[in-house]
Image: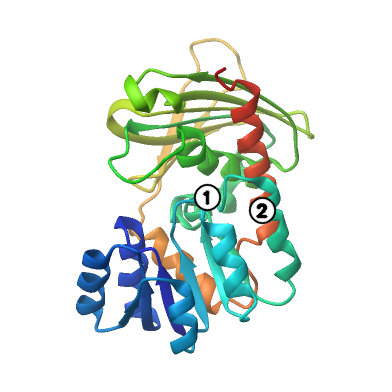
């Protein structure tokens, strides 16, 4: 089993710790918050450090998840890359594209994986296996909405929620040629400097368009995608992991045609556990940094195009 560590043990970093403790030899954690750090270290009986530099001096680590605020990730990642440690960089990997691009020089030296968790959602994997059942994709529409995050996040909704749909749409449709966006700023006070709602229109090289809606305005958590094809429609529910196929039994455009709906039985699986297993043990890097850089570039473009003055 590989020796692992987690840098940043907030709510999501703690999920990484839980899974690494199950599938690897969790050796250490790092966090600047002493209370949290000691609590998690005691829970998993591992060493804890206030900085990654302290950890590097004292531990032999094979792989690390960096689950920090994105502005810090590239700089911590570069320090670890110099020690030949495989890295999983949580989305969105950074806020400055150039600082993330600098990490590409280490891709042939270590495994550097992007934390794009929805690619490991079983419903997305089933969709990819069945997508040909609706023939050519005509359009994709996604809604990823919920309440304002009660956690340390000094950025807007695009880098938090929007990037998930960007990497899913790009996986399904390929190269993106054009980005358009419209942002909203609805929270008051200090929070008003961040966009809390966005519509993103992506135009792909193959001629297909997709629409992404994200916001922090909705009291309930909603994560769904619809893929419209020539011969049917797939409805994806990320939360329930349900995949529904809707097909017409008639080629007529009239309203009288009959519709067949197929929902597949499934066993719920935790996407993060699948992701970390793949990161540690798959022969091929599941989500190369180059792909992540391309997705981050699209997210930053969407943000800048409609940036509030």
Say what secondary structure mark 1 lies in: loop
Residue 246 visible in the shown view: yes
Q: Give residue 208's quadrant in the image.
A: top right
* Colouring: rainbow
Number of residues whose C-alpha sits closer than 10 Å to that of mark 2, classed few (under 14), some (14–19) or many (20 or more): some
Cα separation between marks 1 and 2:
9 Å
Residue sitting at 50 percent across and 10 percent down? Answer: 255
Number of marks in the rendered image: 2
Q: Quadrant of the N terminus?
A: bottom left
Looking at the rendered image, the quarter that the C terminus falls into is top right
Picture coordinates of residue 48, whole percent (x, y): 32, 78
Q: Could you tell me which residue is drawn at 65 percent across and 23 percent down?
A: 305
Residue 139 appears in the figure:
no
Side of 244 relative to 103 (left or right)? left
Among the 4 quarters of the image, the one containing residue 16: bottom left
Note whether 74 is above or below 262 in the view shown.
Answer: below
The one nearer the camera, 173 or 5, is: 5
| Towards the viewer: 294 or 67 | 67
Label 1: how many Cα within 10 Å (few below 14, some 14–19, many 20+): some
Q: Residue at x 46, y 22 (%)?
A: 258
- x 61%, y 37%: residue: 299
Q: Position of residue 49 (x, y in %)?
A: 36, 76
Q: Which residue is mark 2?
A: 99
The quarter of the displayed image where residue 131 is located: top right
- Callout 2 secondary element: helix
How far from the left and from the top, in percent, is residue 126?
50, 53
On the image, numbered disc 1 is attached to which residue? 71
Instruction: Give coordinates of residue 136: x percent, y percent.
Output: 69, 35
- Could you tell which of marks 1 and 2 lies nearer the N-terminus? 1
Q: Nearer the viewer, residue 46 or 163?
A: 46
Q: Is residue 21 above or below residue 120?
A: below
Relative to 20, is 80 on the left or the right?
right
């Amino acid at each position: 089993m590989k020796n692992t560590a987690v840098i940043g043990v907030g709510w999501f970093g703690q999920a990484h710790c839980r899974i690494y403790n199950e599938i690897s030899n969790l050796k250490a954690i790092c966090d600047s918050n002493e209370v949290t750090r000691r609590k998690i270290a005691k829970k998993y009986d591992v060493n804890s450090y206030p900085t990654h530099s302290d950890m590097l001096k004292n531990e032999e680590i094979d792989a690390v998840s960096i689950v920090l605020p994105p502005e810090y990730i590239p700089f911590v990642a570069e320090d670890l890359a110099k020690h030949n440690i495989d890295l999983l960089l949580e989305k969105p990997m950074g806020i400055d594209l150039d600082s993330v691009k600098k990490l590409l020089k280490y891709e042939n030296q270590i495994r550097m994986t992007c934390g794009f968790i929805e690619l490991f959602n079983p419903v997305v994997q089933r969709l990819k296996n069945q997508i040909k059942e609706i023939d050519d994709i005509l359009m994709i529409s996604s809604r990823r909405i919920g309440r304002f995050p009660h956690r340390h996040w000094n950025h807007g909704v695009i880098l938090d929620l929007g990037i998930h749909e960007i990497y899913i749409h790009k996986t399904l449709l390929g190269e993106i040629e054009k980005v358009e966006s419209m942002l909203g700023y609805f929270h008051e006070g200090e929070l008003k400097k961040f966009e809390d709602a966005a519509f993103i229109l992506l135009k792909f090289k193959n001629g297909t368009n997709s629409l992404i809606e994200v916001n922090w305005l909705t009291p309930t958590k909603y994560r769904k995608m619809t893929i419209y094809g020539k011969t049917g429609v797939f409805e994806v529910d990320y939360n329930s992991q349900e995949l529904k196929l809707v097909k017409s039994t008639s080629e007529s455009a009239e309203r009288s045609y009959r519709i067949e709906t197929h929902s597949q039985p499934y066993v719920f699986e935790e996407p993060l556990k699948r992701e970390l297993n793949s990161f540690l043990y798959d022969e091929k890097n599941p989500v190369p940094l180059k792909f992540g850089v391309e997705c981050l570039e699209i997210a930053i473009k969407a943000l800048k195009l409609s940036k509030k003055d």
